[in-house]
Structure formats: structure tokens, C-alpha cells
Image (cartoon, grey):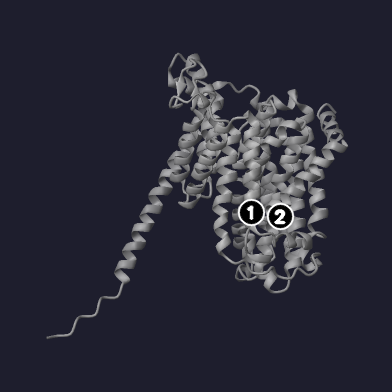
Amino acid sequence: MDFLSPVITGFGVVFQPENLLYCLLGVTLGMLVGVLPGLGPAATIAILLPITYNIEPTSAIIMLAGIFYGAQYGGTITSVLLRLPGEASSVVTAIDGHEMAKQGRAGAALGIAAIGSFIGATIAIVAMTFLAPAVSGFAVDFGPAEYTMLALLGILLVTTLGTGSPSRGMLMALLGLLLATVGQDPLQGTARLTFGSDDLLDGIDFVIVAMGVFGVGEILYNLESLRRKTPPPAAVGSVYPTRKDIRESSSAIGRGSVTGFLLGILPGGGATMSSMVAYAVEKRTSKHRERFGRGAIQGVAGPETANNAAATSSFIPLLSLGIPANATMAVMFGALMLQGITPGPLLVDDEPELFWGVVNSMYVGNLLLLAMSLPLIGMFVRILRVRPAILAPLTILITMIGVYSVRMNVFDMFLMIGLGVLGYLMKKVGFEPGPLVLAFVLGGILESAFRRSMRTFDGQLSGFLTQPIAATLFGAIALIVVLALLRAVRNRRALRNRRATERRTEPAEPAGPRR
């Protein structure tokens, strides 16, 4: 009964009219963000960070969480109707979802995606209700050594298991760690990497990094889409799937729920990887693999269930350990810190109303999304006609006002623009900004925990191996590094063999005419 008491109290927090309103606002904004290709939940949350200053902490986090998992629903609409993923996690949905749309079954694809998303998210919330407090209880005994290894493991997993190149991800993580050191040394007070600027003595605010790299960078990158003409969306039709559709999709929804929940907990996993893995699982386990890519409903149900389950379970390491599992969670971490709340093992005991209020708000939010996603699809389709040339300048203006309102400093506006240009250039050449932001967030934790550990161990690195949990985490780090190196060697060898085969099969040049 002691366990159920705070859970029930959390429902009381959610059903306060103010929190219900912010939950509705969050999931509605999330769907809009998902429908509009390119912006993404991380950029939207980053842009809205200054607004949350004047909102009560629980209400603010409920709203921002709703944006995150609501965007997973919205991204499906453009994937199915236009083959244009509104979210990275909806990329694989576009394969079979758009094929179903061309066959006149767009409504069935959207309907089964909404149902699968609701089931996957609900299962993940129930599991999180029981698992998150247990993880927090286990992590209460974590000391500086354990947090040092945990932060390193989080950065390493994001760079090696993410969707981009591991080497590029590692470079972005190192850049993020470098930016985290700008300002005054936390122990000695000496200036670091300030280049004589008084504006940098306090370091670079997380809001500036998030709004610059994600907000401005994404907007600049997506302005290139103005050159491409978007085809008109396919007709939707009935959004209620038939009994046959539900019967064929039930196993895919079950497998997607488990896959998404497990990969969502893992740093570097998240909704995008979960949807890709779920699609691969469905294709491999299907008795009719030839249907995939031609309108298989399992190819929609599995990934959509998985990405919503992962979006929910990724809150477990954030709230229980204080370790963000992906870029969007890194921005959520920053939002909590701005509210004066430190995510981690003590959050369940110190802020039970916030913890259980946010967790239980997901039940309500997913019910709202299910209620909106089916009957209001036609309205969201009309939003696709809004020109990016109108939205982009308005969004830039909002970010400029927002970043200035944080410290009332014009320098912050120029710094945000500079980071926005950096974010645009990174995306342009194939560098994902996620590892940079994640490493920037974890950089402060890593430095503080490492220096405290070295004081405890009298400067001996071997001291980390004397702590059982820290030593286990170090072993996991070493194993991941070895596996990453082996994979790199195998990929390089396969590339070399493929090039050699291509050279052998090239036709010989015809001989010239004899003289």
C-alpha cells in the first residue's frame, strides 16, 4: 500500500484542471510538430524552454513530455500520406504506410498506427510505474565513481549505438564536452576557454546550446526543402481498421511494445532505433516477407508501436538515474534543471508529486492522443498546406526573444545564432547534433563526479576498480569499445572485399583500331 499511495497521489496531481490543460496543450503541440516535417520534438522543446520559467514545474514537465510522445503520433500522418516522415522515428513507417495509401488504405494504416501507438505507450507506462522506483532505489547508493562511469557509458552508447556514424558521433560528443568546460573552473575559479570575454565567465547556458543547435540549426537546414515541391496528400478514407487488420497486426503490436520498451531504456536507443529494429523483426518473423515494402500492415503496426513505447520508457533513465537516453531527453534534463529540479535517484522521494504526476500524465495524454488522432486527421492534413516560408521566420523570431529573456543579454542571441549556423553545417555534412547536446548535458556531471572520485582515490585511477558497481560499468564500457572496434574492422574488410570484387568484374576496355 505504501507503493500505491504516491501513485494515487500522482493521479490527483494530473487531474488538477491546470495540469490537464497543459497535458492537452503538450500533446496537441506534439502532434502539430510531428505533422510538420523537420522541426522535431527536441527543437520544439528547446524553443519553449524560456516559456517554462513562468510555469509551475510539474505543469511545465507534463507539457514538455506531451510534446515528445505526441510528436510520435503526428509523424505518422505525413509518412503515410506523403511518404515524408514528420519524425525520424517514422521513417520506416513510410515504406509500407505510403504503399497502403496508394492502394486506398491510408485510413487503415493511420488507424492501426494510432491503436498500436496507444497500446505500446500504455504497456510502457505500466512497466515504468513499477520499474522506475526500483531503479531509483538501486541507484540511491551511487557515489561519484559510479556516476563517472555511468556518464561515460551514456555518452559512449549514444555515439556507438545511434543511427549515425560512431566516429562522427564521438567527435560531436567530444565537442559537447569541450563546450561544457567553457567558463570558470568549478573548484578553482579560473577562467577556461573564455578568450577574455566576461560574457562567457558563467559558461554557456544550456538553453542557448539547445535552441541554437536544435532550433535555429534545424530551421536553417529545413529551409532547403522550399526548393522541393511536395506532392498532394493521398485520400484518407475510413480510419477505423477492420477485424482482419487488427488480427494481422496483434502480434506485431505485442512484439513492438516489448522491443520499444527495452530499447527506449538503453542510452542511444530511443524511438528511431526502436522503430527500425521493430520493422526488421516483423520482416524476419513474417511468413509473407514479400509483402513488406508493398503495403504490409505489420510494417506499420510494429514500428509505430515500438517508437511510442520507446518514447515513454526513455523517461526511466532520465528520472531514475539522471542520465538522458537521447537528445530529446537531454533537452528535458535541461528543462528540469532550469526549474531547480535535479533528476536522479532522489527524485522519487524528494519530488513525489512531480515524479508521479509526470508518469501518470502519460496515461491521460495517450488517451487524448487516441481520441484526437482518429477523428481529427483531416484537420492535421490541412496544416500541411502551411508554407515553411511563413513558419520559419516566426520560429526564428520566437527563439531570439526566448533566448534574450533568459539573461537579458544580447551576447546570448549572437551566440545562439553562431551555434545555429554550426548545427546547420553539422547536419549538412552528416554530423548529427544529438551526441553534442547529450555530452554537453553530461559534461558537468562527468567533470564533477570524476574530480570528486580522484580526490577520494588520492589521484589513482585504479580506485574505480575497487568499487563493485563502478568496476562493472567500466567492464561494460570496455566491452562496448572492443565490439565497436571489431565492427569497424569488419566493415572496413567487407568494403575492401566489395571493391576488389567490383574491380575484377569490370569489363576490359576495348582495344583501339590497328594501324
Quadrant of the drawing holding the C terminus: bottom left
* 91 shown above or below 469: below
Helix, strand or loop at mark 2: helix
Front residue of 361 and 85? 85
The residue carrying mark 2 is 74
The answer for how far apart the CA atoms under marks 2 and 1 are is 8 Å
Q: Marks 2 and 1: CB-CB under 8 Å?
A: yes
The residue carrying mark 1 is 87
Occupied quadrant, residue 12: top right
User: Residue 337: horizontal and vertical position, in percent?
Assistant: 65, 29
Front residue of 339 and 312? 339
Q: Residue at x 70, y 48 (%)?
A: 309
Helix, strand or loop at mark 1: loop
Front residue of 227 and 461? 227
- Describe residue 71's horizontal placement relative to residue 501 as left or right: right
Q: In this view, which residue lies farthest toward the front?
A: 410
The number of callouts visible is 2
Q: Residue at x 44, y 24 (%)?
A: 196
Q: Residue at x 83, y 54 (%)?
A: 371
**Type of residue at label 2?**
Gly
Looking at the image, can residue 14 be seen?
A: yes
Q: How many other residues sit within 10 Å of disc 1, few (<14), some (14-19) or many (≥20)?
A: many
Quadrant of the drawing holding the N terminus: top right
User: Residue 203: horizontal and vertical position, in percent?
Assistant: 53, 27
Looking at the image, can residue 469 be seen?
A: no
* 223 shown above or below 230: above
